Amino acid sequence: MRKFKTESKKLLNLMINSIYTNREIFLRELISNASDAEDKLYFRSLTDSSIELGKSDLVINVAFDKEARTITVSDNGIGMDKDSLDANLGVIAHSDSMEFKSAQFADVEKPEEEIEADEEQAVPNSDAVDIIGQFGVGFYSGFMVADKVRVVSRAYGDDQAWAWESDGVEGYTIKEAAREGHGTDVILHLKPNTDEEDYDSFLSEYGIKDLIKRYSNYVRYPVQMMVTKSRQKPEPDPKPEDYKPEWEEYQELETINSMTPIWKRRKSEVEQAEYNEFYKSQFHDFTDPQRTIVVHAEGAISYDVLLFIPGRRPFDYYSKEYERGLQLYSSNVLIMDKCEELLPDYYGFVRGVVSSQDLTLNISRETLQHNSQLRAIAKKVEKKITAELQKMRDNEREEYEKFFENFGRALKYGIYTSYGMNKEELGSLLLFYSAKEQKMVTLDEYVASMPENQKAIYYAAGESTERLGKMPMVTGVVSKGYDVLLCTQDVDDFCFQAMANYAEKDLKNVAGADLGLESEGDKAAAEETAKANEDLLGAMKEALDEEVTKVAVSSVLTDAPAALTSEGPVSLEMEKVLAGMPDAEGMRSQRVLELNANHPVFEVLASAQEAGDADKVKRYSRLLLNQALLVEGLPIDDPVEFAQQIAELMQ
């Protein structure tokens, strides 16, 4: 037995127990190695006329034996002789594939600037330098599931095969063996089951097919396997009257993987129905995507992108359980199923694939070494999504409104969580219901239709557009000729406060103080009325105690006797949202009770104050406050008292 070097033993132990976090990727690694072996023979055939084969002659075979507890991965690639087995498998972290790639393609250069291919251009083929193996450690992932690994290999052009065998502990042996034809067989002898690990799950047709499809579906060579099928037995002749069809099982060699990734094909060569089927099968949705985005880029970093905007919102999209991210492939091998770094959170609804052979992976090929490469791709992905949404917004408004109903909340959260840093980009994608237009409008459309003298964008936040449209402050603003955006999602007010302004226009909640709507005459009249009724306003403030910050005369209200507004950073709508959060207890708005001096109720209050009827002023003050609270959808502190006061008035 040949001993592993002390350093190699330590590295092997580290690899088996630490480097790989997911045991099931062992099959991905072995199939990738087999693909490399096929590549090497194919590339040699391009310059050696004595090798008569093409890519169609090269296949990878996977088999399992449940009784013997073995899994075998075979290829008919370049194979290895005795010295190669010793060098490649006896020295851990030695990559023959990397050496081959460096030697064959040392002079290949890529353009410094990124070029994005359109549908009419041929997409440059970078597969010629696409060798998967980089670190020479993938083979040893087999020891995560196997207590013994046997490799039988015969180099192309040699008559003798050799067998490398090891338990992954002390060392390995290399002996003469028999094998028909060139290539390599890797035989894993699986470990026995334990309480923590079920290795039998890898010894099933379904289990192995699932691993192949999940991780190696787009390896460029056919990955074949004998699968069990059923068929009807031939009918006897003559057929008895009581004959019933009989079925039998049989074995058939089947290609498991798809080989050609749909994202590497030009969009003009792919039917939308093909994209739809890929999306539904790959991302487990039963509806077609609303939009498909295809990108082919060549440059310092070459990559292919296939993105889908779903046609419906996943039921758990706004829950903590929802996992965001794109599938990340390197050399057509799945590296990460959900790579969150490829998408900003506000575009987390997008599904799709990013594939690049230029990513610098870590030793386990499960994560990346240089995030700068990923960030460069992520920026392009974000720009493409934004451009597609803008195109849909401008050209297919009905479709965009459908999209916004599904995922508009995510865009608003994106503005809020970034403290408004991306308000210009995302703000242009937002839609809100217009009180004047009675339809959904963008912020740009709102600004374009503003009167010349309008200084701000006005909005109201609440539960429904119907209810908001009847709010006293909304009707008051609309009566002055200004539009109001009716916002019905809990994030709206937070989003607008984070934005602060848009297109150089301040964003103002109509339930907030100081809207700046009154003319100088209106302002002077309100101040004069407030001064004349200073005692009444003071008495009402005293009656309402700490429930309001102040009582004031409004210059906006038209029909309602009173309304609630707020001062400070917490609006009335925010107060309602925060009331349902465990960590926001006690966070209340600074409420202002605004009175309509032109309403008959104000005259009744003024008369009661003048007559010295303090009890009536107090009761009516509480009635007006409770009415205003109900209109705003806020809870009443004492509903029993409110009901009694209504009953007294009715009597």
Image (cartoon, rainbow, N blue to C red):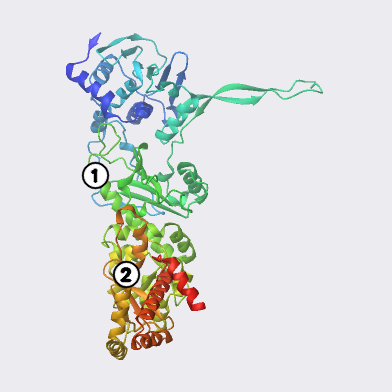
Residue 502 appears anywhere in the view: no
Determine whether 566 is above or below 210 in the image.
below
Quadrant for residue 363, please give it: top left
Viewport quadrant of the N terminus: top left
- Tag 1: Cα neighbours inside 10 Å, few (<14), some, or many (≥20)? some
Tag 2's secondary structure? helix
- Tag 2: Cα neighbours inside 10 Å, few (<14), some, or many (≥20)? some
Disc 1: which residue: 371
Q: Are marks 1 and 2 in contact (CB under 8 Å)?
A: no
The residue positioned 31% from the left and 31% from the top of the image is 21
Who comes first in sequence, dot 1 or dot 2?
1
Determine whether 642 is above or below 292 in the image.
below
The residue positioned 45% from the left and 74% from the top of the image is 645
Disc 2: which residue: 547
Q: CA distance from mark 1 to mark 2?
A: 53 Å
Residue type indicated by callout 2: Glu
